[in-house]
Image (spheres, rainbow, N blue to C red):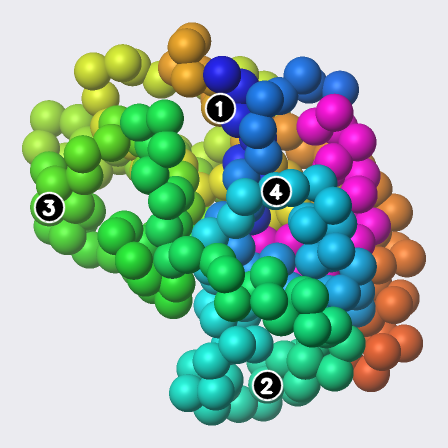
C-alpha cells in the first residue's frame, strides 16, 4: 500500500491541485490529509470541494475545528481570526458538513494520523513537546508510525538509546527501521514555513516501510496575490510566496 500523506493545505487551491497532479503520477493507493484544509488561503471552498470530489480522508485541524466550533473560534484573535472570518464567509453548507464530519485522529494500516500531537491534540506543536513526553508517547503508541502536521515543517522524530532524535526531511527516499517507532511531520502543502515555497507532502510505502519526500513547484505567486486581493494578512501571502518562517 502506497499512501500519500498531506497536511496544511490552508485554502491554497493552486498548491493543492498541483500536488494532486504529482500524486497521480506516483501511483498511490490512498490520500490522507492531516487537517487544516482551510484558513490563511483565498480558496477554502474550492479546496474542500476538491477534497470531497477526490474522496480524500482527513482528520481535523485546528482551523477546521474553529470553523465548526464557536468556542474554539473564540480562542483566536488578530490575523488568525481575520482569516477565519474570511474562510467562514466562503464555505458552502456541504463544505461545513464535510468539516463537521472529520474525526480528531485515525488509526489505519499500523499508522496513527493526527494534526497536532498524539493522541488527540489539534493545537500542540511537535517541536514544543519535551523529550520526556515524547519518550512517554513512543512507549504508549501502539502503531509503529505516527503522522503529524501543524508545524508546516518536515521532520522525522524517533527514540534511540533512551534519547530523542530529530532530523529534517529533504526531497527523496527515506528508509525506516522496521523495529523502531517514528513521528513524521509531513510539512505543508499550501502554507510552507521552512524557507522553501514548494508544496510538500510524503508518500508512505507500508510494505517497504519507506518514505518518499515530495517537494512540488507550483504557481505560488498567483496564490499569494489572491491572498492579498482578498484583504488577508500580508504575512500569509509571504509564507506562500517565499516559504517565510513565521
Instruction: Give the vertical position of 133 relative to 171 (above or below).
Output: below
Which callout, 2 or 3, points at the residue further toward the start of the chain?
2
Q: Position of residue 148 (x, y in %)?
A: 41, 46
Of badges 4 and 2, nearer the viewer stands 4
- Spatial CA distance of label 2 from label 3 is 34 Å
Q: Which residues are magenta?
A: 8-24
Residue 56 circle label: 4
Kind of element beneath mark 3: helix
Which image quarter is the C terminus in? bottom right
Secondary structure mainly formed by the magenta segment: helix
Eyeballing the image, is 66 above or below 127? below
Residue on which the image places disc 3: 136
Q: What's the distance in space between the residues labelled 3 and 4, CA to CA?
A: 31 Å
Question: Distance of mark 4 from mark 2, alpha carbons?
Answer: 26 Å
Residue for point 48% across, 58% down? 102
Circles 2, 3 touching at the beta carbon (< 8 Å): no
Query: Which residue: 38% across, 57% down?
Result: 104
Amino acid at each position: 500500500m502506497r499512501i500519500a500523506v498531506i497536511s496544511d493545505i490552508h485554502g491554497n487551491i493552486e498548491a493543492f491541485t498541483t500536488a494532486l497532479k504529482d500524486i497521480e503520477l506516483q501511483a498511490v493507493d490512498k490520500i490522507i490529509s492531516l487537517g487544516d484544509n482551510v484558513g490563511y488561503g483565498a480558496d477554502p471552498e474550492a479546496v474542500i470541494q476538491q477534497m470531497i470530489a477526490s474522496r480524500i480522508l482527513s482528520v481535523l485541524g485546528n482551523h477546521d475545528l474553529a470553523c465548526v466550533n464557536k468556542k474554539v473560534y473564540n480562542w483566536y484573535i488578530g490575523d488568525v481570526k481575520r482569516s477565519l472570518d474570511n474562510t467562514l464567509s466562503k464555505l458552502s453548507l456541504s463544505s461545513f458538513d464535510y468539516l463537521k464530519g472529520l474525526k480528531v485522529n485515525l488509526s489505519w494500516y499500523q499508522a496513527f494520523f493526527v494534526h497536532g500531537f498524539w493522541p488527540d491534540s489539534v493545537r500542540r506543536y511537535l517541536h514544543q513537546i519535551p523529550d520526556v513526553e515524547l519518550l512517554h508517547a513512543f512507549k504508549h503508541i501502539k502503531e509503529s508510525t505516527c503522522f503529524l502536521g501543524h508545524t508546516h515543517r518536515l521532520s522525522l522524530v524517533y527514540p534511540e538509546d533512551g534519547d530523542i532524535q530529530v532530523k529534517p526531511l529533504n526531497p527523496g527516499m527515506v528508509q525506516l527501521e522496521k523495529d523502531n517507532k517514528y513521528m513524521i511531520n509531513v510539512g505543508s502543502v499550501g502554507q510552507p514555513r521552512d524557507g522553501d515555497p514548494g508544496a510538500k507532502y510524503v508518500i508512505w510505502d507500508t510494505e517497504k516501510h519507506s518514505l518518499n519526500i515530495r517537494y512540488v513547484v507550483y504557481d505560488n505567486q498567483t496564490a499569494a496575490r489572491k491572498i492579498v486581493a482578498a484583504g488577508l494578512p500580508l504575512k500569509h501571502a509571504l509564507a506562500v510566496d517565499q516559504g517565510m518562517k513565521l
